[in-house]
């Protein structure tokens, strides 16, 4: 059997993230997916059985398949992003399981930043809560194209169609305000504990005629890697072995962020703006005829150019904008509020530069879907619109066009802590 993530696996790959409030049963749902798709190793399952017996349970606690850290098991919570890999005959999956506590919303940003689909959980007894709206706003802001609401613990409301319908209507209305179309959203009644509509269809919800969660994950349209976008390649490392065998070798290593590159392609090195062509594409396994988004390679260029870590190699046609001033949407993750005039570090691609937040023009209230103009500050977990000025010019794309080169991080210069996730040019959800 080919494991998810295997380089020889040619099935479609879906990257998804899960999020929900504390005690909504998210870890149990993920555990159920792993268990019912037979993606659990025998020793892992034995460990879960033993731990469940120690807790006095008569059936396996599937949440333990996910909450692997000892502190998480003892507290019964998820405290970090955990990446899980599983596969079915139809598709491979990379699942980012994010924590539910409000103080860990920053981890939700991390997990959803590369996701093609997000699964949000709600407790059928509680319905849509503040954290549900916050998570939905975050994934909308990050441009996650597909959204699933799993109405969990449907068994605890007697598999009530009425309860499910009320929650679904409220959620559909809310995410429509975030810019989602009905085709991009699916609401599914599930019981992670008993397995209803997770992998197998439940006869206890005859009123629900849609797909199970796994069926939807297997069939939802997957957006391909941005191969047809303009080429983008942040330089991670300059390779100069200076050995007798390779006296003149000079290669530029990194990961293709977008597009495709081939030998002979004309490129520009930014921010300097120097033009040259690609003469060869190297990998540890030999030369390539082309490299696409997601591949890690070393580029050999035709001319000897002064290039350093942090530079961006891009297609000459449709090159990114090089600027030291830009507007962006920020998801503020710092404990201390952000105020205009703050001096920070900006990490864009592989480059880090000093910057100043010159203006806060708006704050988005994800609960009411309204905009607060010119706020005095942004506090933890708040989303807002800001203007930045950087010490060095950066080659930036609009986030809505090329996510990887339109995204950046704001870092605390005093201790290196991540303060915000930023998206160049991205509009606040209510302004779409």
Image (spheres, grey):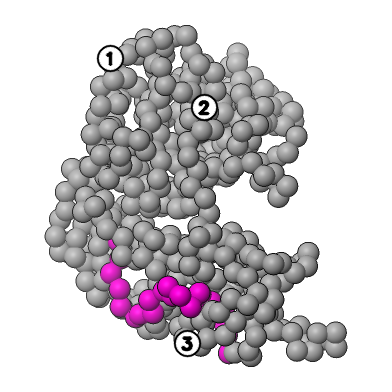
Q: Position of residue 158 (x, y in %)?
A: 37, 10
Q: Residue at point 18% right, 43% down? A: 368
| 315 or 253, nearer to the observer | 315
Q: Residue at point 38% right, 51% down? A: 143
Tell which circle, 3 or 2, labels the residue nearer the N-terminal end.
2
Tell which circle, 3 or 1, labels the residue nearer the N-terminal end.
1
* Segment colored magenta: 306-329
Label 1 Cα neighbours within 10 Å, binned few <14 / some 14-19 / many ≥20:
few
The residue beneath circle 2 is: 215
**Mark linked to residue 162:** 1
As for residue 327 lying within the magenta part, the answer is yes
The residue beneath circle 3 is: 272
Establish if 241 lies above or below 128: below
Establish if 201 lies above or below 242: above
Q: CA distance from mark 1 to mark 2?
A: 24 Å
Q: Position of residue 348 (x, y in %)?
A: 45, 70
Q: Is residue 104 visible?
A: no
Per the image, label 3 sits on a secondary structure element best described as loop
Q: Are marks 3 and 2 in contact (CB under 8 Å)?
A: no
Q: Position of residue 325 (x, y in %)?
A: 30, 78
The quadrant of the picture occupied by the N terminus is: top right
Per the image, label 2 sits on a secondary structure element best described as helix
Q: Is residue 273 left or right of residue 263?
A: left
Q: Residue at point 33% right, 57% down? A: 331
| 398 or 183, nearer to the observer | 183
Task: Place residue 373 in its image quadrant.
Answer: bottom left
Instruction: Between label 3 and label 1, give the one nearer the viewer.
Output: 3
In the rendered image, the residue lying farthest to the front is 264
């Amino acid at each position: 059997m080919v494991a998810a993530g295997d380089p020889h696996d040619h099935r479609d790959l879906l990257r998804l993230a899960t999020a929900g409030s504390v005690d909504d049963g998210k870890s149990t749902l993920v555990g159920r997916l792993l268990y019912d798709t037979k993606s659990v190793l025998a020793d892992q399952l034995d460990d879960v059985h033993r731990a469940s017996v120690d807790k006095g349970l008569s059936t396996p606690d599937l949440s333990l398949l996910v909450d692997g850290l000892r502190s998480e098991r003892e507290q019964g919570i998820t405290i970090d992003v955990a990446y899980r890999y599983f596969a079915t005959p139809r598709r491979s999956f990379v699942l980012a399981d994010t924590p539910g506590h409000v103080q860990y919303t920053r981890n939700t940003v991390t997990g959803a930043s590369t996701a093609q689909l997000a699964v949000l959980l709600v407790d059928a007894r509680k319905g849509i809560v503040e954290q549900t709206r916050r998570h939905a706003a975050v994934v909308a802001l990050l441009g996650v194209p597909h959204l699933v609401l799993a109405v969990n613990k449907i068994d605890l409301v007697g598999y009530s169609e009425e309860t499910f319908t009320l929650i679904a209507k409220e959620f559909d209305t809310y995410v429509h305000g975030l810019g989602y179309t009905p085709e991009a959203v699916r609401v599914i009644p599930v019981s992670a504990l008993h397995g209803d509509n997770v992998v197998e269809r439940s006869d206890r919800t005859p009123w629900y005629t849609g797909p199970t969660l796994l069926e939807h994950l297997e069939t939802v349209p997957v957006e391909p890697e941005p191969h047809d976008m303009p080429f983008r390649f942040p330089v991670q490392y300059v390779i100069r072995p200076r050995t007798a065998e390779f006296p003149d070798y000079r290669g530029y290593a990194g990961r293709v962020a977008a597009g495709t590159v081939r030998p002979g392609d004309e490129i520009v090195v930014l921010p300097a703006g120097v033009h040259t062509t690609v003469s060869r594409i190297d990998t540890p396994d030999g030369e390539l005829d082309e490299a696409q988004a997601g591949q890690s390679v070393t580029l050999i260029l035709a001319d000897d150019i002064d290039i350093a870590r942090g530079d961006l190699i891009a297609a000459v046609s449709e090159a990114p904008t090089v600027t030291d001033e830009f507007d962006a949407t920020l998801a503020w993750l710092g404990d201390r509020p952000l105020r205009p005039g703050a001096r920070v570090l900006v990490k864009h691609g592989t480059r880090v530069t000093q910057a100043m937040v010159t203006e806060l023009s708006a704050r988005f209230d994800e609960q009411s879907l309204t905009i607060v103009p010119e706020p005095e500050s942004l506090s933890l977990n708040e989303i807002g619109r800001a203007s930045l000025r950087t010490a060095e010019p950066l080659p930036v794309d609009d986030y809505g066009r090329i996510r990887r080169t339109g995204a950046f991080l704001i870092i605390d210069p005093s201790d290196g802590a991540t303060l915000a996730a930023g998206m160049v040019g991205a509009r606040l959800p209510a302004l779409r």
